[in-house]
Amino acid sequence: MHPTFSAFVRSWPWAPWLMAGLLMTATIYVRGYCSLRRRDPARWPPSRLMAFLAGLLALYLALASPIEPFASLLLQVHMLQHLLLMMVVAPLIWLGTPFLPLLRGLPRAVRSVWLGPVLRSRALQWLLTRLTHPFVALPVFTATTWLWHLPSVYDAALRWPALHYLQHVSFLLAALVFWYPVVRPYPARPRWSPWLLLPYLLLADIQNTVLSALLTFSDRVLYAYYAAAPRIAGLSALDDQAAAGVLMWVPGSVAFLGPLGWIGLSLLYGTPPKAPAQRAPLPLLPILVPQTSRPFDLLTVPLVGPILRWRWARVTAQTLLAVLAVFVIYDGLTGPRLGAMNLAGVLPWIHWRGLLVFGLLIAGNFFCFACPFTLPRAIARRWLPQGREWPGWLRNKWLAVGLIVLFLWSYEAFALWDSPWITAWITIGYFLAAFLIEGFFRGGTFCKYVCPIGQFNFVQSLMSPLEVRIRSPQICAACTTHECIRGSATVTGCELQLFQPRKQGNLDCTFCLNCVQACPHQNVGILATNSIAELSSDRWRSGVGIFSQRTDLAALVLVLVFGAFANAAGMVGPVVDWQSQLSQLFGLSSPVVAITVFYLAAIIILPWVAVRSAVALNQLVAPLMVTRRELATRFAFAFVPLGFSMWLAHYSFHFLTSSETIIPVTQRFTRELGWHGLGMPRWICACCRPLTDWLLQAELLALDLGLLASLFVAWQTAGTLTTTATLRWKLAAPWCGVITILFLLGVWIVFQPMQMRGTLPGGG
Amino acid sequence: MRTAFRLLTICCLIRHFSANEVHADGGTIRLRETRGPIQITVFTAPTPFRAGDVDVSVLVQDLQANPLAQDAHITIIAQPRVVPSVPLRIPATRAAATNKLLQSAKFPLREPGWWRLDVVLETGDSVEHFEFDVEALPALPRWITFWPWFSWPAAVIALFVWHNRLAPCQPAPGDPGDTPIAGSRLIR
C-alpha cells in the first residue's frame, strides 16, 4: 500500500459529539419510520429508511473521516468533502422524507406540545415556502457556491477554523434548500409547475460547469493556501486544482443532469402519480385505536430484571459494598496518611461519588439499594429493643439538613478527602448510627430521617429516569391485602412506609424493592418516569405529603442545591485564595474560620436571601392568595435539576480525571495484605489526567440542561398558581433570575483552575 | 418539521464545529525547507498562534514528496526568545496527529511573546535542526473558546418564548391539584 494512502485510511478524526448527534437523529428517525411503516407500508418502503441513514452516514464521512484532515492538504479532497455535503447528503436526506418519521419518532409531548405550535406558525411556513421555491433556492445555492469559491474567501476559510465551519454549514443548508424542490419530500405539495425543475437543474449545472471549468483550465493556482501547502504524492498544486475542477465538473453534472433527465422523461412520458391508483383499498387502512405504549420497565430487561427480582439481590449487593467499606476502614486506620495513597482517600471521595451521580443519572437510586450501612439492621433488630417510635418532633428532614450542612462544612474544614483516618471513623460512625437507630426505632427511621447520604440520593433521584412504581392502577384498585406496604409471609413491606398506589416520584424511596418482592400480582416495576414534570406538581404523595406543606423538604433541597455550588467552588483557585486572604487579614493560622464564613454564607444565608427576595418580588407583582412559605416551598423544587447538574459536573470531573488512582492504591493495599499478584504500585497512575476539552464540554452541557430543566419547572410551577399568561411570566421571573445566576456561577466554577484532589502531583 | 430537522442538524454541526481542540492538521505553515534528501513542513495551531495549548505538527517527505518509509524521531524544543529559560522538549509522534502523514506534539505554551521553536529531526545517524521564531499572542480566556457551550440555552429560551406566544400557556395538564379549580390557592 502506498504510504500516503496508508496514512489516509488511518486518519480518522475524533468527533464524539457529531457521532452522538447523528446517532440520536437516526434513532428518532428509525423509531418514527417503524411506527409509520406499520400503518402504511406502501408509503414507507425501506428505500426511504436506507436513503436517510445513508445521508447521515455521508454527513459523517464528510466531516469526520480521513477526508477532513486531508482536505487542508489537497484541494481535490476538499472538493470531495464539499461535493458530499452538497450533492450527496442533502438529496439523500430529502429522499428519506424526514419530516414525518422525525416528528413521529419524538416523544408525544415534544411533538404535540412543543413542535406543533411552532410548525403551525404561519410566518415560519411562509418563510420556508418562499425559501424552497425554485426562484429563490437556485440563487441561494449559486450565490453560496460562488461566494465561498472566491480565492480570498476560500483562503480565509482555510486559515480560520470558525470560518471554515461556517462554510460547511452554509454549503449544507444551501444544498438542503436547493434539493428540496427537486425531491419534494412527502408531504410537500408545491404549487409551482414541475416543468420549472428543468430550467432549474439546467441552470444549476451551467453555473457548476462554469465554476469547475475555471478551476480546471486555470493556468495559475487560484488559492494561495494550497500554493503554499506541501505537495502530497508528487502532485503539483496546479494539477491538484485541475483534478478538483474535474471532480466538481463530472460528478456535479451527473448530480444535476441525472435528475433533470429523470424528471424530464417523467413529465413527457410518465403516467400520473401512481400511488393513489395502486394504493390498497381503504379497508386495508383501518382506523387504529391510539395505543398507549407501556413505559420501559427495567425488571423486564433480560438478565438485569431477573437479577433485580432475585430475593437475595439486595443482600448480595450490600455485602459487596460492606466488604469494600471494611477495606476502607482498615486501610484508613492502618494505611498511609496521604489520601491519594489510601483506599479511604480514593474509593469514597473519587469512585463512589462519581459512580453515584452516574447511577442516579442513568437509572435511579441504586446506591441506597446496595447501601452497606443498613446490612446489619436485621441483627440490630434482633439484639436491640426495636419497636420504638421516632420522636414526633424529629419526623421531618431538619435533622438531616443539619447533618448535611455539618458534613459539607467539615469536608472542607478538615479536608476529609485527604484524611483517610477521619474517613474511616466516619464510616464506622455511620455503621454504628445505622445499627443503633434501626435497632431502637422502627420503620426505616435512619434512612428516612437521619442519613445525609440517603437524603442526597432521594433529592437527586428526583432527576432519575427510573422509578419504582405500579404497572397497572386497576390491579391495585382491586387489591385488598396491600402486601407492598404490609409485607408478606416472606418479605417485609416498604421499609419507608410508601404505599405504592399513591407513591409519586423517587423521594424517600430506597429502591429496596421489597414491594417488588412482596406484591403477589407482580404489579410493581422499575418504570421510566418523566421526573421533571413531577417537580412542579403539588399533589399528595404517599410517605411525603404535599410539597407546599413541607418546609423541611424545601430546606433540604435548597441546602443540597446551594451546597453543590459551594462544594465545587471550595476547590477552585479564586475561592481558595479568597479564603487564604481572609485568614491572613484576621491573622488566623487556620483556614477553618474563613471556610466557616464561606459555607455559612453559601448554603444558609445566600439561599435564604435569594428565596426571600424572589418571594418579595412575587408579592410585588400580584396579591397573593398563597402564603409566602408555600410559594417558597413550591418554587424550591425548581432548583433540583440545576443542583443535580452541578453535582454531576463536579463529581464526574473528579471521577474522570482521577479514576486510575485506584490502581496503585489497590496494588499497595494488596501487597500490604501479603498478596503480591498485582505487582508493584504504579504510582504514575495516581497522577490526574489533564482536563480535556470534551470533559469541560460535558460539564457545561450538564449545566445547560440543568438550567433549562430548572427554568421549565419554575415556569410550570408558576402555571399552577395563576390562570393568566402575563402573571405566570411575572411569577416565574424572579425564580428564573435566581436560577440563571446560579447557572452562571456554575459556568464560572468549571472554568476555574481546580484542585486535583485525591491525586498525587507528578505521579508521586 | 423542516425547522426541527434543520435545527437538529445545525446543533449537531455546531457541537462538532465548536470543538476547539488544537490540531495542526491544516494549521498555519511556519516552515518549509529541503535539506539533503528530505523536505520538512512545520504547521502550528491554533491560528492565530496563542499561548495556552498549542500543536506543532511536522510533515517529513522525501524529494518526491512521499512520506518517509520509517518514522523520523522528532523532538520539538520550545524556548522564549527574549528571556531564555528551561526549554520545553516534546516528542512529536504520529499517534498524536489526526492526519497520520504528520507527527504532532501538543503542549501548553506558558506565556505570550516570541518563542524560538527548534524541530530536531533524527533520521538514521543524522540529526538536523530546523529553527524558526513564532510570536504567540496572549491566551484567550477559555470561556471565549467555549462560549457556544454555555450560551446555546439562550437560543432555546428564545424559542420557548416564541413558542409560548404561538401557543398561549395552559395550566399543567393531568394534575387535579394543579388546575385552577384548586381555586383558593390561585393568584389572580
Image: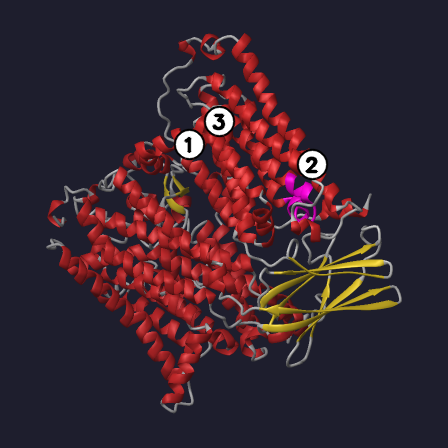
A647 to A332, vertically: above or below: above
For label 2, the residue is: A216
Q: Nearer the viewer, residue A509 or A165?
A: A165
Front disc: 3 or 1: 1
Packing grade of label 1 (10 A; few <14, some 14-19, many >=20) is: some
Q: CA distance from mark 1 to mark 2?
A: 32 Å
Label 1 marks a residue whose chain is A
Which quadrant would residue A217 be assigned to in this image?
top right
Q: Does mark 2 fall on the same chain as mark 1? A: yes
Callout 2, which amino acid? Answer: Thr
Q: Nearer the viewer, residue A727 or B87?
A: B87
Which mark is first along the chain, 1 or 3? 3
Horizontal and vertical percent position of residue A123: 32, 34
For label 3, the residue is: A97
For label 1, the residue is: A131
Packing grade of label 3 (10 A; few <14, some 14-19, many >=20) is: many
Label 3 marks a residue whose chain is A
Q: Does mark 1 fall on the same chain as mark 3? A: yes
Left or right of residue A388: residue B63: right
Left or right of residue A211: residue A573: left
Packing grade of label 2 (10 A; few <14, some 14-19, many >=20) is: many
Where residue B162 is drawn, which disc sits there? none
Horizontal and vertical percent position of residue A640: 34, 56
Callout 3, which amino acid? Answer: Thr
Q: Secondary structure at mark 3?
A: loop
Q: Which residues are magenta?
A: A65-79
Identify the residue at the far bottom of this view.
Answer: A587
Horizontal and vertical percent position of residue A102: 45, 33
Callout 1, which amino acid? Answer: Leu
